[in-house]
Amino acid sequence: MSEESEHRPEDGRADVTIRHKDPPNRRAFLVGATSVLGMAAANLLLSPPSGRALDVPGDPTKVPGALATVYGSRSRFEQAKRLTKPQHSRTPLQDLQGIITPSALHFERHHNGVPLIDPSRHRLLVHGLVEHSLIFTMDELKRFPATSRIAFVECSGNSGKEWKGPKGKTVQEIHGLTSTSEWTGVRLSTVLEEAHLKPEATWMLAEGSDAAAMTRSIPLDRVWDNALLCYAQNGEPLRPEQGYPLRLLLPGWEGNTCIKWLRRLKLVSAPLMTREETSKYTDLMPDGTARQFTFEMEAKSVITSPSGGQRLKASGFVEIRGLAWSGRGRVEKVDVSVDGGQTWQEAELQNPILPQCHTRFRFAWHWEGQEAILQSRCTDETGYQQPTLKELIEVRGINSYYHNNAIQSWKINEDGNLRNVQV
Ligand SMILES: Nc1nc2c(c(=O)[nH]1)N[C@H]1C(S)=C(S)[C@@H](COP(=O)(O)O)O[C@H]1N2
Ligand SMILES: [Mo]
């Protein structure tokens, strides 16, 4: 059992002994034994004694192991799961390491199910204000120069239930509508240049071929350098849930603009005011007007471990871990507070730190068994700092649902239990 699984909720097999005194070696690690040897010793101490009652036949060095498989799967001892509702599912952020979300755990949001599309019959139509209307097959799109980049996708409805008080319990439930993948495809600009845009072509309508036939208007000048038409995710074809065989990826923009199962790009001279950009995905302000075209997802961060629903089973060393991201560029800095935002200390950012990408942060802490409120706060490269919920509400009022990037607070009780609070 690793330190990680000590924090995992619903782990009935975990050892629940609370150690009030640190073993001497772990102490040494905490006062600065940062050598590889020190780390190894500390890790050993964090591991439980062997002999945990698992259904394993004998000594694995005495019997041949399993044979090779054509497509791998997780160890049967690992159980990270998406939290599913019919039209969406949430990534188990508390179970992730590093920055890449395994494709099978990428969050899903579809408005009328996941279509089954035969790639050999799929077409992309480019038309409207162009010199040449064009129809591409998937093979033709794959012949263009390819490019890959790692980027997050976040639904702008992520964390949306938290505007009017703490509702969710776990980080997955509250913030699980964001994931990061390596995306591969052809640049949108490459494909549009083939069609020769007319000078009036300043926006495009992107349309999906799902039963929702989702459409969004996209201003071309703002996406020209970054937009991708993706056919692959984490080294393999897109998952059906992520838009197989083709999706639009606008790095850093609200998930809704990243049209999946993409079948049509119509070049136009103004936004078409579709349902998804008028009655949905806009924010009602206190004065009755709506914020429209809030494309970039603002800087945000969340502590994923320890987090709501988990329990610290022992006092002593705790590595506070989390994710930070910004739709406007790179994460510049993450501060962590253990006293509900009264004081802040800078967390360590783990490489790589990429634009429009989840960034892993870590902060070494010593829990003495006292009550504490953990928070993280992201500052991005534009200097923008993630707000408290109070600051957000001062500007936005309480009629918003989308675009909630407020600081998350996890309260630790003396018994080690963590829960979602607002301070
Ligand atoms: N065609 C189509 N594209 C779509 C959607 C949809 O329902 N249909 N949902 C959108 C929404 S609201 C989000 S948040 C993202 C989710 O992408 P994911 O399912 O790959 O995480 O896809 C967007 N693209
Ligand atoms: Mo979304």
Image (spheres, rainbow, N blue to C red):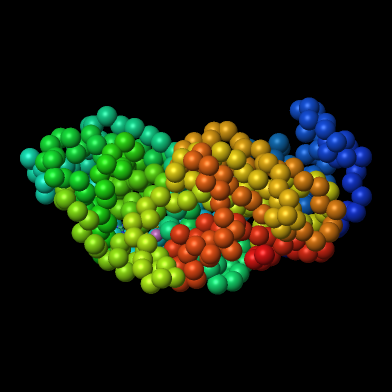
Q: Position of residue 271 (x, y in %)?
A: 22, 56
Image point (86%, 40%), residue name: 26
Left or right relative to 305: residue 160: left
Determine if residue 222 is in view. Answer: yes
Q: Is 5 displayed left or right of 285 in the figure? A: right
Up-down relation of residue 358 to residue 390 (above or below): above
- Measured from the top left, where is residue 359 in percent x and y? 55, 41
Q: Nearer the viewer, residue 223 or 137?
A: 223
Q: Looking at the image, which residue sits at the far left?
A: 131
| Residue at the image position 67 percent from the left and 54 percent from the top | 375
Q: Is residue 176 among what the camera can see?
A: no
Locate the C terminus and report the quarter of the image it occupies: bottom right
* Ligand 1 visible in quadrant: bottom left
The x and y percentages for residue 34 are: 78, 30
The x, y position of residue 121, in whole percent, is 18, 49
Q: Answer left or right for 57 relative to 324.
A: right
| 407 vs 35, nearest the viewer | 407
> Looking at the image, which residue sits at the far front?
287
Q: Residue at x 19, y 53 (%)?
A: 270
Q: Residue at x 11, y 49 (%)?
A: 128
Could you tell whether 372 is left or right of 205 in the image? right
Q: Is residue 220 positioned above or below 210 on the image?
A: above
The mark total stands at 0
